Image (cartoon, helix red, strand yellow):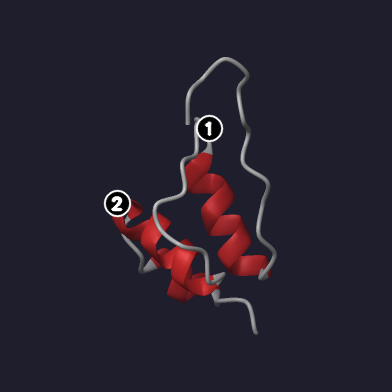
């Protein structure tokens, strides 16, 4: 699978990024991400074609 182009990624509104990420990497939605930089991580993953490992904080019930 080829990474998305910068133009393709830039065209995705922030509120739609999680859906695009799940579709691109064939991940069932919803995935729960507790990360303040999630938009950056998702855009980077779509550009590189490599998924990222979400930060899982201990003590939080996901």
Judge left or right: residue 17 versus residue 35. left
Query: Is 37 in front, or is 5?
Result: 37
Q: Position of residue 50 (x, y in %)?
A: 70, 64
User: Most extreme residue toward the bottom, as rendered?
Assistant: 1
Q: Position of residue 13 (x, y in %)?
A: 31, 59
SS for callout 2: helix
| Side of 50 where 22 appears, left or right | left
In percent of the image, x 47 and y 31: which residue is there? 62
Of callouts 1 and 2, which one flags the residue occurring earlier in the amino acid sequence?
A: 2
Q: Nearer the viewer, residue 33 or 44?
A: 33
Badge 2: residue crowd in 10 Å (few <14, some 14–19, many ≥20): few
C-alpha gap between disc 1 and disc 2: 15 Å
The residue nearer to you, when weighing 20 against 3, is 20
Q: Quadrant of the N terminus?
A: bottom right
Q: Is residue 6 left or right of residue 58?
A: left
40 vs 20: above or below: above
**Left-right relation of 28 to 12:** right
- The residue positioned 51% from the left and 20% from the top of the image is 60
Looking at the image, residue 33 lies above or below residue 9:
above
- Labelled disc at residue 15: 2
x and y percent of residue 54 in the render? 62, 41
Element under disc 1 = loop
Q: Is residue 8 above or below residue 27?
A: below
The image's mark for residue 35 is 1
């Amino acid at each position: 699978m080829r990474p998305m182009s910068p133009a393709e990624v830039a065209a995705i509104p922030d509120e739609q990024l999680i859906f695009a990420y799940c579709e691109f990497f064939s991940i069932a939605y919803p995935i729960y991400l507790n990360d303040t930089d999630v938009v950056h991580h998702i855009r980077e993953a779509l550009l590189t074609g490599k998924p990222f490992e979400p930060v899982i904080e201990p003590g939080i019930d996901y």
